[in-house]
Image: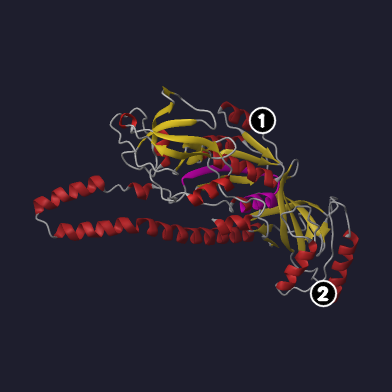
């Protein structure tokens, strides 16, 4: 049980209770599952953890066969200067030996000749026994974390295994692609079948004209889309990390981004420094470059600098995700909202009396006063809750007999409101083309009653944000 220093994660006591709720009962609660409270930062109870692991292995009689070909589990992969592609693995069967005593190694679709083997202390050794961690160098391509490493007899056998796995992967991919293609072309095929049936019922002249029209309109723009109709923003990313585990953690966190407003597309990802070829690919795809604990080669940095492509370098996964979230928010279109005018609260106007003079029958006297929200609710409780006019424009504002642009607090004023010709639901339309206050033909609102409340507001443009809870991705999943 690691000690959590973040308020977003549960404490050790809550973790034990949560495990018990799922049927995992620790020894503290009378169960048979060992639980050791540790802190890697303060090196607390690390010796007790090792002793607990040894005791548990003796009770379970965990053993491995040291003879035969080696078998291991890939734990980590990275690129190391001077060694090239390196994989850290846990030996589970046989002895992992160095070339030429060992045959070729296969993990996933990667082949290696183990020219260098290091133990858990970083010392070069000739072999590693089961139960120990080994670092193997000599890979042609990096395997993936979680792959099973197997020792084979010859290079030809290893190449045959890799070819078979590649064929299986391509076959599964082709099946998935065919299913997606069929779904994408279903509407077009339906239209084409309808076209054929309708053409059979026409005479030759009409059929030729109908065929010409169909050929001109057969290019459906929806068929050329990328299938992300519900995502308005697409942000391509290029991610380079130091190890395979960091890349997997980053991609898993980016997958929690809600897809209703944006779509994150990891165009290129890999382990090791950023190369010039990857830099040119990022420029061609207009992708945003993110590096995690790796350097950028000078040639690649020069290419990115010439094309004005920024490099976002991070060493904390949460900071990288926050940077991606800010970039997505910058690309989202703005939102428009009604903002009530008032520095410390909404500005309300209470109607004292409608004007009785025919010459100024369009004016109504009001008192300007500022109230807090609670007092505003009390005012609305005594007033008519029905909306008499909306999206009205101030045509004239008077204080006494003088036209004014604004009035002070607690001063009576006269105002003429003109009604909009039609109510517009789209606030962006109101923001771009607000109603004119000088329109002489606009109808005047004159249905004033003493006690009516008038509230002023304006349409403002705000930056859109996404509800992406990086610290607690389960909240984002539940809300999206």
Q: Is residue 427 magenta?
A: no
Q: Residues within 10 Å of mark 1 (few under 14, many from 20)?
A: few
Discs 1, 2 touching: Cβ within 8 Å: no
Question: Which mark is nearer the camera, 1 or 2?
Answer: 2
**Figure quadrant of residue 389:** top left
Magenta extent: 232-252
Q: CA distance from mark 1 to mark 2?
A: 58 Å
Answer left or right for 340 relative to 450. right
**Figure quadrant of residue 156:** bottom right
Task: Specify the label residue 298 is tagged with.
Answer: 1
Residue 401 on image: x %, y %: 41, 23
The answer to whether residue 334 is visible is: no
Residue 102 on image: x %, y %: 75, 58
Quadrant of the image containing the C terminus: bottom right
Out of 97 and 294, give the one closest to the viewer: 294
Out of 310 and 275, give the one closest to the viewer: 310
Task: Specify the label residue 194 is tagged with.
Answer: none
Between discs 1 and 2, the one toward the N terminus = 2
The single residue placed furthest to the front in the displayed view is 356
Query: Looking at the picture, does residue 341 appear above or below residue 125?
Result: above
Residue 25 on image: x %, y %: 77, 74
Tag 1 secondary structure: helix
Quadrant of the image containing the N terminus: bottom right
Residue that carries the numbered disc 2 in the rendered image:
29
Q: Residue at x 59, y 29 (%)?
A: 303
Answer left or right for 437 relative to 258. left
Q: Residue at x 24, y 60 (%)?
A: 193
Residue 2 on image: x %, y %: 80, 59
């Amino acid at each position: 049980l690691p000690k959590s220093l973040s308020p977003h994660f549960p404490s050790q006591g809550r973790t034990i209770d949560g495990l018990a709720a799922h049927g995992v009962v620790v020894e503290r609660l009378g169960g048979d599952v060992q639980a050791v409270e540790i802190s890697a930062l303060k090196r607390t109870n690390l010796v007790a953890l090792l002793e607990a692991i040894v005791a548990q292995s003796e009770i379970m009689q965990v053993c491995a066969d040291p003879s035969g070909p080696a078998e291991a589990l890939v734990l980590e992969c990275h690129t190391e200067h001077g060694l090239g592609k390196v994989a850290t693995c846990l030996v589970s069967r046989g002895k992992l030996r160095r070339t030429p005593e060992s045959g070729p190694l296969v993990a996933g679709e990667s082949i290696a000749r183990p020219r260098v083997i290091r133990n858990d202390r970083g010392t070069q050794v000739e072999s590693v026994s089961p139960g120990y961690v080994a670092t193997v160098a000599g890979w042609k391509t990096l395997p993936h974390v979680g792959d099973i490493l197997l020792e084979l007899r010859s290079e030809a056998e290893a190449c045959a295994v890799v070819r078979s796995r590649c064929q299986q992967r391509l076959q599964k991919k082709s099946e998935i692609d065919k299913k997606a293609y069929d779904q994408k072309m279903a509407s077009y095929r339906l239209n084409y079948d309808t076209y054929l049936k309708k053409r059979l019922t026409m005479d030759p002249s009409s059929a030729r004209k109908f065929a010409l029209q169909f050929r001109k309109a057969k290019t459906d723009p929806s068929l050329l889309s990328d299938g992300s109709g519900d995502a308005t923003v697409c942000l391509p990313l290029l991610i380079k990390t130091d190890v395979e585990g960091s890349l997997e953690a980053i991609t898993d966190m980016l997958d929690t981004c809600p897809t209703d407003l944006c779509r994150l597309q990891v165009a290129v990802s890999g382990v090791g420094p950023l190369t010039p070829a990857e830099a040119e690919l990022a420029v061609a795809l207009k992708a945003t470059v993110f590096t995690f604990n790796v350097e950028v080669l000078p040639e690649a940095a020069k290419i990115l600098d010439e094309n004005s492509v920024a490099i976002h370098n991070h060493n904390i996964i949460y900071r990288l995700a926050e940077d991606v979230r800010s970039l997505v928010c910058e690309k989202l279109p703005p939102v428009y909202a009604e903002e009530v005018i008032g520095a410390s609260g909404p500005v309300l106007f209470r109607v004292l009396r409608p004007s009785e003079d025919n010459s100024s029958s369009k004016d109504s006297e009001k008192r300007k006063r500022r109230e807090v929200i609670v007092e505003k609710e009390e005012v609305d409780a005594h007033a008519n809750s029905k909306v008499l006019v909306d999206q009205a424009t101030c045509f004239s504002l008077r204080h006494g007999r003088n036209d004014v642009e604004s009035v002070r607090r607690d001063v009576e004023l006269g105002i003429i409101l003109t009604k909009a010709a039609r109510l517009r639901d789209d606030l962006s339309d109101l923001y771009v083309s607000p109603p004119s206050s000088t329109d002489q033909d606009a109808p005047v609102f004159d249905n004033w009653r003493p006690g009516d409340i008038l509230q002023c507001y304006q349409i403002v443009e705000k930056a859109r944000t996404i509800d992406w809870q990086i610290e607690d991705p389960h909240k984002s999943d539940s809300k999206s």
